[in-house]
Image (cartoon, grey):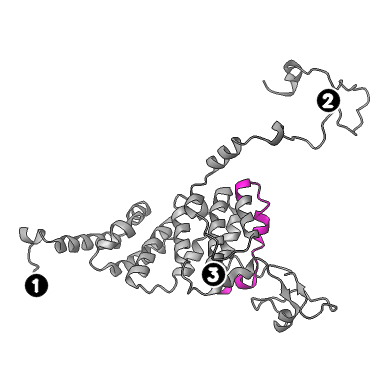
Amino acid sequence: KRERSLTAQDWGDAGTYKKSFSEAWLALLAAPLPDDVVKKALARLHTDVVPFLTRPLLLADALSAAYARGGVVAVLALSSLFFLIQNHNLEYALFYQHLYALLLPTVMQVKFRGRLLRLADTCLKSPLLPAYLVAAFLKRLARLALATPAPGAAVALPIIYNLLRRHPACLPLIHRAVTFDEAEAEGGESANGGEAEEQEPRNLKKGEARNLSRDPYRMEEPDPYKTGALQSSLWELQALRRHYCPAVAKVAGVFLDPITRQRPELSLAEALQVSVASLVEEQAGKRAKGGQVALTFEVPATLLGAWPGVAEPEGEPSSGAGELVTVGALAPFFRL
């Protein structure tokens, strides 16, 4: 059966434009396109294309294929997939598992890092999510904060705080102490049901708390259910409180206060504005207390002579403490 050709009256109908628009985009995404073209197509697909399609669910196969390419293409595809899940009831069972797999140190340094972290923060807002899933994301983000530069840690910490605030069942991860009762009930096995932990001392009383001998969380496990994150602890926060960057250490100090729903969430938009340049500029603009910066633990007696408590080599007299050292005298030691 031959299709009827479109008339001028048909083109005056908005539905005709919408149908042609949908057919064109479906044909484009079904074609074998290089990665750079796919990135441009997926960048604004969830905002400028999907809401205007006649049947948006027809994009599910194309988006799943785009995700299989991995990397940045997968990040862009997940944005549209979440739009279909949220607005068109798409059933995508592996969505959270794929989102969890994308949280890697390499992704934290790409151009679309902000899009991925916003997506993770939005997807994990539902209070109906199981605690093991939220705990897996908490541990993965905490490890990323340790492994990535300061701007990445500055973004990961607010997400961790907001997740703990929304999901009180994960609050025990901030301070984890396993009691002898729990260890006895585990039958000598770890919380993951795998290798046995070190033996308990025989004089340990029932109910007495012990520290975890190792972290039961498995970073390399792709399935959040099998990571054992819910039996772990967020010890990474303690390390981040001693971060070399003062801005990161300040945010990590927020976890010392009780986390309740009465406290406001930390702003993710402000954290995404943090960059290496902004951190350097912030520190460069600060003045040292007292106007002096400590460079050594002990003030040396001379510039090129012996340090206090260190004997002078024989035959090499030390210069006086008040002797003036000129640039010409230092020339042999530097390439001027």
The amino acid on which the numbered mark 3 sits, given as a three-letter code, is His
Residue 13 is situated, as x and y percent measured from the top left of the image, at 11, 61
Neighbor class of circle 3 (other Cα within 10 Å; few <14, some 14-19, many 20+) is many
Which span is picked out in magenta?
A: 225-248
Please give left or right for residue 136 compared with residue 243 in the image.
left
Q: Earlier in the sequence, mark 2 or mark 3?
A: 3
Examine the image and state in which quarter residue 57 appears.
bottom left
Q: Nearer the viewer, mark 1 or mark 2?
A: 2
Task: Assess whether mark 3 and mark 2 are in contact (beta carbons under 8 angstroms).
Answer: no
Which of the pair 321/65 is nearer the observer? 321
Q: Secondary structure at mark 2?
A: loop
Residue 86 appears in view: yes
- Which residue in the protein does label 2 denote? 302
Above/below status of 109 relative to 324: below
- Which residue in the protein does label 1 denote? 1
Q: Nearer the viewer, mark 2 or mark 3?
A: 3
